[in-house]
Amino acid sequence: MIIKNAKLEKSVADIKIENGVITGIGDFTGDEEIDAAGRKVIPGLIDIHVHGFGGYDTSDIGRLGDISVKLAEAGTTSWLPTTMTDSIENLIKVTNQPLAPDGANIIGFHLEGPYISKKRKGAQNEKYIKNPDTEEFRKLKNVNIVTVAPELCGAEKFIKNCNAVVSIGHTDCDYSTAVKAIEAGAMCLTHTFDAMPPMLHREPGPIGAAFEKGIYAEVICDGRHVSKTVFLALYKMFTSDRLILISDAIRPAGLEDGKYSSGGLDVHMNGGVLTLKDGTLAGGSGSLLDGVKKAVSFGVDFYEAVKMASQTPADLLKLNKGRIEKGYDADLVILNDDLNVRDVIVGGKVFKSKILRNV
């Protein structure tokens, strides 16, 4: 396959794809061609924190494929199905599901809970919150990221012996506890500023520790979970090399306003804002591409915003994705002039859907 006339960051060129991999950037001809007609072509977006989309939830056994299709329609080509705090028995069922859907690639799971703080639980079910347990965690398959509150009993030992990326989140820890967790191996912050202590001038907390120690940080860029000013401050602190855009989308994302269920709790969507009955924010209602657009509207360079939703999460997880360069996986998105999705290529194949035009 050859994508002709692709607008890349620094040039307009053709992209040659063979066996699901980019094999050249230049001037090519071939039997199967897609004409991008000078439109922007970006790496497929990688969402490392998404609970559901379009009416489906990661806890719905057998529905990961439906979520993958809807995410691909929205420009996300790889994702980590993210669980809510639940019983270990249910989490085992969820993480043991087959990972061979249509649509976006499933990299593995992100376990958000149950190893979190009750004080900073956010929209998580307190009934199932517990201390970290290494032996229990090993019963869960295909987990790439696990969110942990490092102040919990046994957390430091868990972090040192964990075979997944540990992200600090839903935590009430102080700066020194966060530093110890990072030195034990924690590599990221979960939805920074949300469900954690703020960064204060004499108590910098986990955010200050993450900045000082040079680890990654997730952020929900929707203008509601984190304000424009704070988002831009995070961007300056962590840079596009370490700041990762996430959607934190849940079941109602992409649907109309109404009452829904997520993680065993009732959530209400009003004007695109998802909350619990008491007003607690309950996750994201848009796609990762929506987050990229919001970052651009805040004044971030378009390609920097794309990098934080593709290359940077790929770097965290050591994936061969997130770049339009020779040797990288051919997961690509062709955008229209309004930055909405025109075409999606996953693994070198054009993704077909009822929303995207067929090529």
Image: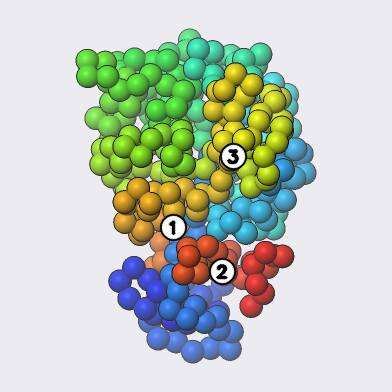
Please state which amino acid type lies under the numbered disc 1. Gly
Q: Which of the two discs, 2 and 1, labels the residue nearer the N terminus?
A: 1
- For disc 2, the marked residue is 342
Disc 2 crowd rating (10 Å Cα; few below 14, some 14-19, many 20+) is: many
Q: Which of the two discs, 3 and 2, labels the residue nearer the N terminus?
A: 3
Task: Single out the residue that lies furthest toward the top.
Answer: 153
Please state which amino acid type lies under the numbered disc 2. Arg
Instruction: Please indicate whether residue 76 sits to the left or right of residue 316 in the image.
Output: right
Q: Which of the two discs, 3 and 1, labels the residue nearer the N terminus?
A: 3
- For disc 1, the marked residue is 322
Instruction: Please indicate whether residue 116 sits to the left or right of residue 243 in the image.
Output: right
Which secondary structure, mark 3?
Answer: loop
Q: Position of residue 270 (x, y in %)?
A: 62, 35
Going 45% across and 74% down the picture, which residue do you hit? 39
- Figure quadrant of the C terminus: bottom right
Between 358 and 84, the one lying in front of the other is 358
Could you say which quadrant of the image residue 114 lies in?
top right
Please state which amino acid type lies under the numbered disc 3. Gly
Task: Single out the residue that lies furthest toward the right.
Answer: 62
Which secondary structure, mark 1?
Answer: loop
Disc 3 crowd rating (10 Å Cα; few below 14, some 14-19, many 20+) is: few
> Is 75 above or below relative to 179?
below
* Front disc: 2 or 1: 2
Going 51% across and 75% down the picture, which residue do you hit? 17
Going 37% across and 78% down the picture, which residue do you hit? 12
- For disc 3, the marked residue is 271
CA distance separating discs 3 and 2 = 26 Å
